[in-house]
Amino acid sequence: SHDEQAILQLQDNLASCLVDVGWCDEALVLRREIYARWVATLGVSHERTILSGTNLLGVLLKLDLWDEVKWLARDQLLPAAQRSLGADHTLTLDLNVKLTGATMLNSKSSRNDLLEAET
């Protein structure tokens, strides 16, 4: 419904404020909830859902939660973005950049992970 989407957008703004003041753990809880509700409301391939997932990635990156970043970006968001938005869409490109950056920053990344992130 329109009301639920408005509430989700307000919660998203609140999560951004939490990140801005350094309350990333609290923002993570809220971002996960928001993403799950967008998935339930609009589906995994909707642009708004993918944007919400990208916002979730930002908090995961701040908290160095590399395994979850890799899973969410590579296995969930990127395929959905490529399928529904196309490879040249801004969100798809942003996801590629975030995944590549996270892979390069993660000291546990294998050589294969780095090569995969490059493509």
Image (cartoon, grey):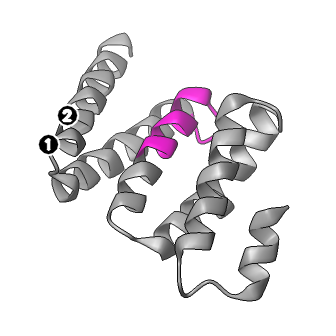
Q: Which residues are magenta?
A: 43-55
Q: Position of residue 31 (x, y in %)?
A: 32, 46
Task: Residue at 32%, 23% (x, y): give it.
Answer: 9
Dot label at residue 21? 1
Visible in this render: residue 56? yes
The answer to whether residue 110 is above or below residue 40 is below
Q: Element at badge 1?
A: loop
Residues at marks 2 and 1 touching, judged by CB atoms closer than 8 Å = yes
Label 2 sits on a secondary structure element that is helix
- The amino acid beneath tag 2 is Cys
The numbered disc on residue 47 is none
Q: In this image, 12 relative to 23: left or right?
A: right
* Percent x, y of residue 26: 16, 53
Residue at numbered disc 2: 17
- Number of numbered callouts drawn: 2
Circle 2 residues within 10 Å: few <14, some 14–19, many ≥20: some
Q: Residue at x 26, y 27 (%)?
A: 13
Amino acid, disc 1: Val
